[in-house]
Image: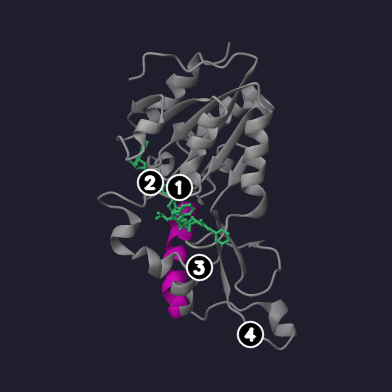
Amino acid sequence: MSSQRFQCDQNTSVLCLTGAGVSAESGIATFRGSSGLWQNHPIEKVASMQGFIEDPNRVWRFYSERRSDAAKVTPNAGHKALAELEKKLGERFLLATQNVDGLHQKAGSQRVLEMHGNLFQTRCSRCTRPAFEDTNVYIDSDLPGCGRCHEKGEFALLRPNIVWFGEALPDDVLERISAFVVAVKRLVFLAVGTSGRVYPAAALVDLAKRVGASTWLVNAEAPENVQRFDHFIEGESGKILPDLFANAIE
Ligand code: BV8
């Protein structure tokens, strides 16, 4: 347990990065570790454009099952604590999440950047029509095609609005994070529930350190990149975050 307290005075802003671990206590599977999603689904087959081209049914089954599971669960105390911290800090708080389950928004967080997309959105695999809200599941059924491409006499499958490996993050995400980080007087960087294995999200701690931020990690176990943090608090975020933020605001 870190000896120093998590403190936010009037000059402090908080950039928080979350990963699958923050949703684990809500019943959402993480990716790595014993019962992780990647145990039963080879990453390159279900989270890449190549995998989608090879077998779109397999990819839609993978994301449809997760879409269906995520629709049934609720935010846990960790999500709620982050939403409460945002209420107290306002524009001095920004949440960048790698998660696609929408649980931060369900908990009331508004200043959320979804780095890897959203399970409840679908977009065309070919044209630039904007992603749209979609709660349908496509398992062993006809896969959805793009109506706009169809109108032009072309055929294109719809795909989950998810950032796959080898794909760029949504344009504004990294710009908004950088703009936030350089504009603040004093920065605290807090990573929660992430193994720090996926880039560019895993490089946010280095960006924070370059502007002199104090860096905190709350995680169930020490991941490979734990040494990049000034403070590491081991444990479940749903139990740790409420206490960590209880007296954080001066
Ligand atoms: C890109 C889809 C370029 C969404 C995902 C260096 C620089 C830049 C890129 C790369 C690089 N090296 C390699 C790359 C390529 C690649 C990459 O990072 N590969 C890795 C494997 C090495 N990155 C990319 O391809 C990215 N794109 O760089 O594009 C580009 C630029 C311009 C033009 C074209 C291309 C795209 C990355 C996004 C990939 N999509 N998934 C989905 O299906 O959900 S990533 C996938 O992993 C998920 O999104 C997930 O969010 C992410 C990270 O995993 P975590 O969230 O950390 O989850 P994990 O299970 O690993 O860990 C959970 C942790 O929680 C554990 O430590 C556990 O102990 C802890 N925990 C569990 N329970 C709790 C808990 N902690 C607290 N409380 C608990 N209760």
Q: Which residue is drawn at 58% across and 10% down?
A: 250
Q: Say which residue label 3 marks.
A: 137
Q: Position of residue 112 (x, y in %)?
A: 61, 41
Q: Say which residue label 1 marks.
A: 73
Compared to 160, does 77 lie above or below?
above
Q: In 3D space, how far apart are the residues under numbered discs 4 and 1 (Cα atoms)?
A: 35 Å
Q: In 3D space, how far apart are the residues under numbered discs 2 and 4 (Cα atoms)?
A: 37 Å
Q: Main secondary structure of the magenta part?
A: helix
Tag 1 near tag 2, CB within 8 Å: yes
Question: For the residue marked with disc 4, what is the amino acid?
Answer: Phe
> Which residue is at the far top?
250
Residue 119, magenta (yes or no):
no
Q: What element carries label 3?
A: loop
Q: Say which residue label 4 marks.
A: 155
Question: For the residue marked with disc 2, what is the amino acid?
Answer: Gly
Q: In 3D space, how far apart are the residues under numbered discs 1 and 3 (Cα atoms)?
A: 16 Å
Q: Residue at x 35, y 31 (%)?
A: 227
Residue 27 - label: 2
Tag 1 near tag 3, CB within 8 Å: no
